[in-house]
Image (cartoon, rainbow, N blue to C red):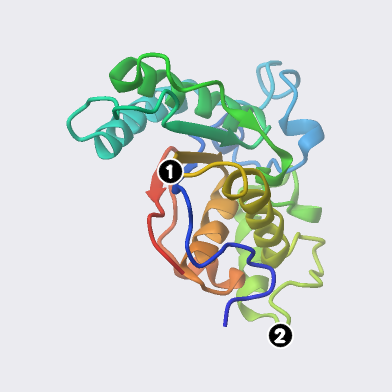
Amino acid sequence: MTPAYNHLPSQLKNHYILARHGFSLANNAHLICSNPDIAIPETGGPLGTGYGLHESGKIQVRESAKLLSKHLFPDQKAPYGDEEPVKMFCSPFLRTRQTAEIIRSVLNETVLDGKVAEPTPNLALRERWFGIFDMTHDDNYHRCWKEDNDAPDHGEHSKFGCESASSVADRATKFIVEEIENKMENKIVILVAHGDICQILQTSFLGMEAWQQRQIEHVETASWRDMKVSK
């Protein structure tokens, strides 16, 4: 039975790609950065420019985006008859906005010749909130994931104040239905987000429970997954 917090229909009208942001300044500092007030602005952080992509992350995303271009368009030709074949949405966090812009640039350069519009940020795609672990060492991710897996309620009432996996699935799949599935069809939709939300969204596409996210192969920085599957 499909969990109540998974709002995806059994048949999707669009083709979805989940993409994780590239290696970031927060990754480099081994920090959990899940607070929008810290992660969205282009201020603060180790360089005073916000918690965006590390320079190595920008290179990483560009190389990954080239592979995505070849995956989506094997003959490297734009599809005929659609002036906007790709739609992009992203978390408003700086690291995801920068990642989305690089992916957009590569797709426009390689195949689509300017047909990919600017990515649309939406808070529904934001990072999972990691409660008391925010801005602490990223080893603490494992404490939240252990609670997801081992707690009787799978982290629904987290003792650490972490957002539950089901809450992430609820907001993200509701966004997909309301803002994408109900408004367009036959599009390639690229959702640029974060590690946990990419993992959790995969469980939604696959019809799994959200807390089972760590049972799926981890989405590394700058990686993407093609979700052209039915639940």
27 vs 44, left or right, is left
Say left or right for 222 vs 95: left
Q: Position of residue 199 (x, y in %)?
A: 52, 57
Question: Which of disc 1 and disc 2 is earlier in sequence?
Answer: 2
Residue 16 at what x, y percent from top left? Answer: 45, 47
Where, quadrant-wise, is the N terminus in this rendering? bottom right
Identify which residue is drawn at 52% across, 73% down.
208
Q: Is residue 113 left or right of residue 170?
A: left
Task: Label 1: state its secondary structure.
Answer: loop
Circle on res. 29: none
Mark number, residue 186: 1
Callout 1 crowding tier (Cα within 10 Å): few <14, some 14–19, many ≥20: few
> Marks 2 and 1, how far apart in space?
40 Å
Residue under the point 65% across and 61% down: 169
- Identify the residue at image location x=47%, y=63%: 11
Q: Amino acid at mark 1?
A: Asn
Q: Is residue 44 depicted above or below 165 in this figure?
A: above
Nearer to me, 180 or 220? 180
Residue type of the residue flagged with mark 2: Pro
Q: Which residue is drawn at the image coordinates 44% and 40% (left, top)?
A: 187
Residue highlighted by disc 2: 152
Label tally: 2
